[in-house]
Image: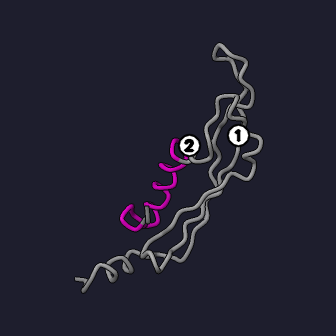
Amino acid sequence: MFENDDEYMKSLKKGDSYHFTYSFEYIAKNYGNDNYDIDTANMEVKVNWDESQMGYVISYSVPEMYKIDPSQGNGSETEFYESDVYWRLMSDLGSIGIGAEAIVI
């Protein structure tokens, strides 16, 4: 039993920080008519415990985002995160005991 919400949230903390790298595919060249070249890039994801917010804060970046051309039909960094990386990250965090309730939104 916990005296307050802060104590409960502190009990969810596993480690101070985690780093993950996820590869994802993007369209390198779109020739039209469903004909395109695919390449891969990496997304670096950091998960850090933030005491002031009582939870893990997620940040991400794609170091080679400059290679990913939106005019070829690609989305933004956020779109790649939401459509491809997010679910893999949640699975990896779950496997180390960090559930969605410990993530700051």
N-terminal of the pair, mark 1 or mark 2, is 1
Picture disc at residue 62: none
Task: Say if the magenta span includes residue 83.
Answer: yes
Q: Residue 26 appears at what percent x and percent y?
A: 66, 35
Pointer 1 residue: 40
Q: Which residues are magenta?
A: 82-102
Label 1 residue SS: strand
Q: Nearer the viewer, residue 92 or 55?
A: 55
Amino acid type at circle 2 is Glu
- Compared with 9, 24 (above or below) is above
| Residue closest to the far left | 1
Mark 1 surroundings: few (<14), some (14-19) or many (≥20) residues within 10 A: few
Q: In the image, what residue occupies the spot 73% across and 53% down?
A: 63
Pointer 2 residue: 79
Label 2 residue SS: helix
Q: How many marks?
A: 2
| Residue closest to the far front | 71
- Mark 1 or mark 2, whichever is nearer to me: 2
- Quarter of the image for residue 97 reads bottom left
- Compared with 18, 37 (above or below) is above
Q: Nearer the viewer, residue 87 or 105?
A: 105
Q: Nearer the viewer, residue 26 or 53?
A: 53
Left or right, 55 with respect to 19, comes to left
Q: Residue 93 appears at what percent x and percent y?
A: 47, 61
Q: Residue 79 appears at what percent x and percent y?
A: 56, 43
Amino acid type at circle 1 is Thr
Q: In the image, what residue occupies the spot 68% across and 16% down?
A: 32
Q: Nearer the viewer, residue 65 or 17?
A: 65
- Quarter of the image for residue 101 reads bottom left
